[in-house]
Image (cartoon, rainbow, N blue to C red):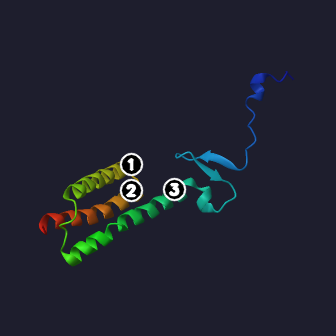
Amino acid sequence: MGKVTDVDTQHKKAPRKQGLRLSGRYNVLSIQGLPWLWSRPMAWIDALGYAAATLTSLAWVPQAWRAWKTRSVRDLSLWMYVLVVTGILLWLIYGALIQSWPLVLANTLSLTFTTFILLTRLLWR
């Protein structure tokens, strides 16, 4: 048998380290041994995205409800809603292009409410 050379020792696998490690396409830390949600980065990132989508979309509901109920939108800034609707539309397109369903969901709902508010601002002067 021949000698063991440096080339032979380079092919040995390093022992796997326990604890924190970078994983997934998001390069987030995953902690081994925690419940399944935290051990799969995509699962908790998506859960975080859906929670953010829900809260930011529902944030427009009180303003839309008040505009509908009082028929008073005189104090709302027209240009602010034009910019917000345009920005949300761009986020919706971006989310669809990268196939990020939390982004698509959030921006579809937000676009619905903000467009309603913008239209009421334009029609109910």
Q: Residue at x 74, y 38 (%)?
A: 14
Pick whichever of labels 3 and 2 is earlier in the sequence. 3
Using the image as rendered, state which of residue 45 and residue 55 is in the foreground: 55
Q: The residue tagged with tag 1: helix, strand or loop?
A: loop
Q: Around disc 2, counting alpha carbons within 10 Å, would you say few (fewer than 14), some (14 to 19), or many (20 or more)?
A: many
Q: Residue at x 76, y 41 (%)?
A: 15
Question: Mark 3 — residue?
Answer: 45
Using the image as rendered, state which of residue 68 and residue 24 is in the foreground: 68
- Give the amino acid type for the residue marked by disc 1 in the picture: Ile
Q: Is residue 62 left or right of residue 23?
A: left
Seen as rendered, the residue at the extreme right is: 1
Q: Residue at x 36, y 64 (%)?
A: 57
Q: Which mark is residue 103?
A: 2
- Cα–Cα span, label 1 and label 2: 9 Å
Q: Which mark is residue 98?
A: 1
- Give the amino acid type for the residue marked by disc 3 in the picture: Ile
Using the image as rendered, state which of residue 79 and residue 91 is in the foreground: 79
How many marks on residues? 3
Pick whichever of labels 1 and 2 is earlier in the sequence. 1
Pick whichever of labels 1 and 3 is earlier in the sequence. 3
Whole-percent x, y for residue 106 in the image: 37, 61
Q: Residue at x 41, y 53 (%)?
A: 100
- Give the amino acid type for the residue marked by disc 2 in the picture: Leu
- Whether residues under marks 1 and 2 lie with C-beta atoms below 8 angstroms apart, the answer is yes
**In the figure, 52 relative to 68: above or below?**
above
